[in-house]
Amino acid sequence: MTDFIEPHGQHGYFTLSGDVNSDMVRRVFDAVADMTEDKLTTAHILIQSNGGYVSDGICLYNFLSKLPIEIVTYNTGAVASIAVTLFLAGKHRYASDTARFMVHKSHATASPGSRPDALSIIVEGLRADDMRTERILRQHVELNEQQWQVHAYSDLHLTADQALEVGLVEAVRDFEIPQGLRLTNI
């Protein structure tokens, strides 16, 4: 175990994996109901996700970041796309040295033969999603100009060390469960 000393209080350890979607939102809501019933003060959550739906990720970010429970998030493999926004809900954030992050702009596929007015609605929705996610990203992360340029037009990949440099994580540290404590899969 690292030299990290946990504060006093009731701690719980959780894993959260899969697509960011309405099912994940429901699972997190149910888990938080149990956390409050168990009177947890801190929830350590390992996140493994390649992303999913923007609105569901933003919902989870807003919900988790405002809880009276201290959320600590960990990336031990991959946190990508909207899952990065979810990850940012952690008051404290960590990544294993072999973990990676990926952020990008929103994207969608139009149906073949879509009319211009339908395409315009899709584009406006994508722009709105990008504004929401970028606002959250900028609150927590300080990318350099080159990284913002990559993000503007492509997938931006960050190693754990790069994530540390830009403030996405506060330390490169593994998710470790103290002996004798239960691990709950959300």
Image (cartoon, rainbow, N blue to C red):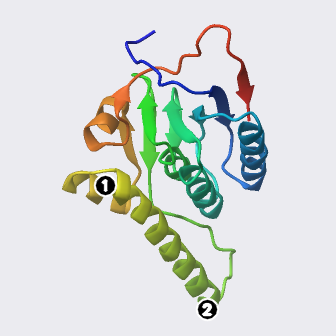
Position of residue 149 in the picture relative to residue 44 (left or right): left
| Image location of residue 4, percent across then percent down | 40, 18
Position of residue 183 in the picture relative to residue 148 (left or right): right
Task: Report if the CB atoms under discs 1 and 2 are less than 8 Å apart.
Answer: no
Position of residue 136 in the picture relative to residue 32 (left or right): left
Up/down of 103 relative to 4, above or below:
below
| Image location of residue 86, percent across then percent down | 55, 49
| Three-letter code for the amino acid on which mark 2 is drawn | Asp
Number of numbered discs overlaid on the protein picture: 2
Q: CA distance from mark 1 to mark 2?
A: 29 Å
Position of residue 17 in the picture relative to residue 66 (left or right): right
Q: Residue at x 50, y 52 (%)?
A: 85
Residue linked to disc 1: 150
Q: Residue at x 36, y 58 (%)?
A: 139
Quadrant position of residue 56: bottom right
10 Å crowding of disc 2: few (<14), some (14-19), many (20+): few
Q: Residue at x 46, y 9 (%)?
A: 1
Q: Which quarter shows the C terminus?
A: top right
Residue linked to disc 2: 117
Quadrant position of residue 66: bottom right
Could you tell which of marks 1 and 2 lies nearer the N-terminus? Answer: 2
| Image location of residue 94, percent across then percent down | 43, 31
| Image location of residue 52, percent across then percent down | 63, 53
| Three-letter code for the amino acid on which mark 1 is drawn | Val
